[in-house]
């Protein structure tokens, strides 16, 4: 079966909401194109710090499926936190929890009067997004993490199995039903806290000591030495095994994508252009009082520069930084506006950041 949805076309739509992560968008778009064509699609594992866009990307996928009638009937997407999966593992039914979530979502999309056969067909073309998958690592410190081991095994079973038996809910007669889970697409994501430091130690003071070479950086008349380190240049499968992800589990992912820490340019675009940005919400808020909120380009960039200093929380830092800038004006909108306008330039932002918004 052919499809007009090429990876490039899907990526172009996803990038309207996901900025600064072209590789992740590209890999997910390829998997989506294969799925929409009715072909087997490889699973994707995304590794990136908090706020780099992992969840935002999957929300964009969900919106994409809902937006187009020709895709809406061919797939569904459910999101699960890995901790929920681990809790279900303690009860001995992690795989069933995933399928039950899909079954419910499929029924909502197909309608309450749809036959179980139609609901199952919709389920079997589903996409499962497991967030914070690093929480189901096989060990924490030197101790085995039994919940994590069972959760990884459950996901592995779903990926590999032709038939998984689950108990149908009451609306389907509470009978045992068989689900073919081979057609599901799994996208897993996590920050993998500590992985960066462990690999950096390996290449600086550990077994690969000396592998990371210094480079000379010349800025005007200043010369300095740097040791540039990018996780993607040094990550190897053994690092993820050591972290607690089993080889059998990792082997089921066709793509392992490392998301970049967001640059100042990317953060500036996210702050200024993202549909759900803190700036847009603030503009809507002030508009409700009849006030136009305006930020100069330099002011917007200065907020992004401050957010970039908090690299471990990515785009989430924008809301905190802008909150420091705007909170006093939000409390007393008319006091700070002039002729129905509130305009901030870089000098205003610098002053307010230094004063904590006062």
Image (cartoon, grey):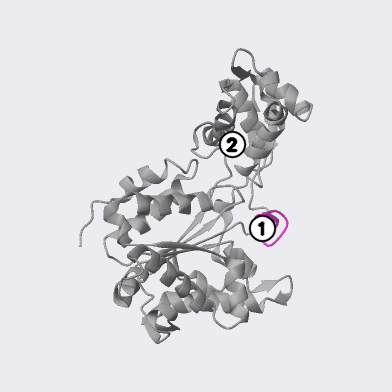
| Residue 42 can be seen, yes or no | yes
For the residues labelled 2 and 1, the Cα–Cα distance comes to 26 Å
**Residue 210 percent location from the top left of the image:** 67, 53
Residue at 62% across / 43% down in the picture?
316
**Magenta span includes 208:** yes
Residue at 39% across / 65% down in the picture?
108
Residue furthest to the top: 339
Q: Find disc 2 in the rendering and name its residue.
A: 278
Question: What is the span of residues highlighted in magenta in the rendered image?
Answer: 194-209
Q: Nearer the viewer, residue 13 or 47?
A: 13
**Residue 75 percent location from the top left of the image:** 34, 62
Q: Quadrant of the C terminus?
A: top right
**Magenta span includes 39:** no
Quarter of the figure with residue 321: top right
At numbered mark 1, what does the secondary structure look like: helix, strand or loop? loop
Residue at 63% across / 66% down in the picture?
135
Asked if the residue at tag 1 contacts the one at tag 2, i.e. Cβ–Cβ closer than 8 Å, the answer is no
Residue furthest to the left: 1
Q: Nearer the viewer, residue 272 or 189?
A: 272
Q: Find disc 1 in the rendering and name its residue.
A: 193
């Amino acid at each position: 079966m052919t499809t007009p949805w090429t990876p490039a076309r899907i990526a172009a739509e996803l990038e309207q909401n996901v900025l600064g992560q072209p590789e992740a968008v590209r890999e997910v778009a390829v998997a989506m194109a294969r799925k929409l064509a009715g072909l087997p699609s490889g699973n994707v594992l995304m590794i990136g710090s908090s706020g780099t866009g992992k969840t935002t990307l999957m929300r964009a996928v969900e919106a994409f499926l809902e937006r187009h009638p020709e895709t809406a009937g061919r797939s569904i997407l459910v999101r699960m936190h890995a901790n929920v999966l681990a809790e279900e593992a303690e009860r001995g039914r992690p795989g069933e929890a995933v399928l039950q979530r899909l079954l419910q979502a499929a029924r909502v999309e197909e309608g309450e009067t749809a036959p179980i056969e139609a609901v199952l067909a919709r389920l079997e073309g589903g996409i499962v997004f497991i967030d914070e998958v690093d929480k189901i690592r096989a060990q924490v410190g030197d101790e085995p993490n039994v919940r994590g081991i069972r959760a990884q095994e459950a996901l592995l079973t779903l990926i590999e199995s032709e038939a998984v038996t689950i108990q149908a809910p009451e609306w389907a007669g509470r009978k045992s039903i068989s689900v073919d889970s081979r057609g599901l697409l799994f996208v897993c994501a996590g920050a993998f806290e500590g992985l960066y430091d462990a690999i950096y130690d390996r290449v600086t003071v550990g077994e690969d000591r000396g592998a990371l070479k210094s480079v000379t950086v010349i800025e005007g008349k200043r010369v300095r030495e740097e040791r540039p380190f990018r996780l993607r240049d040094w990550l190897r499968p053994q690092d993820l095994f050591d972290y607690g992800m089993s080889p059998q589990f990792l082997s089921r992912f066709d793509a392992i994508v490392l998301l970049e820490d967001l640059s100042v340019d990317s953060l500036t675009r996210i702050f200024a252009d993202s549909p759900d940005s803190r700036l847009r919400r603030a503009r809507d808020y002030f508009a409700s009082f009849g006030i136009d909120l305006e930020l100069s380009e330099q002011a917007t960039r200065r907020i992004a520069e401050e957010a970039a200093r908090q690299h471990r929380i990515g785009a989430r830092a924008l809301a905190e930084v802008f909150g420091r800038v705007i909170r006093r004006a939000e409390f007393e909108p008319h006091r700070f506006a002039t002729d129905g306008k509130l305009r901030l330039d870089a000098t205003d932002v610098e002053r307010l950041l230094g004063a904590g918004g006062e």
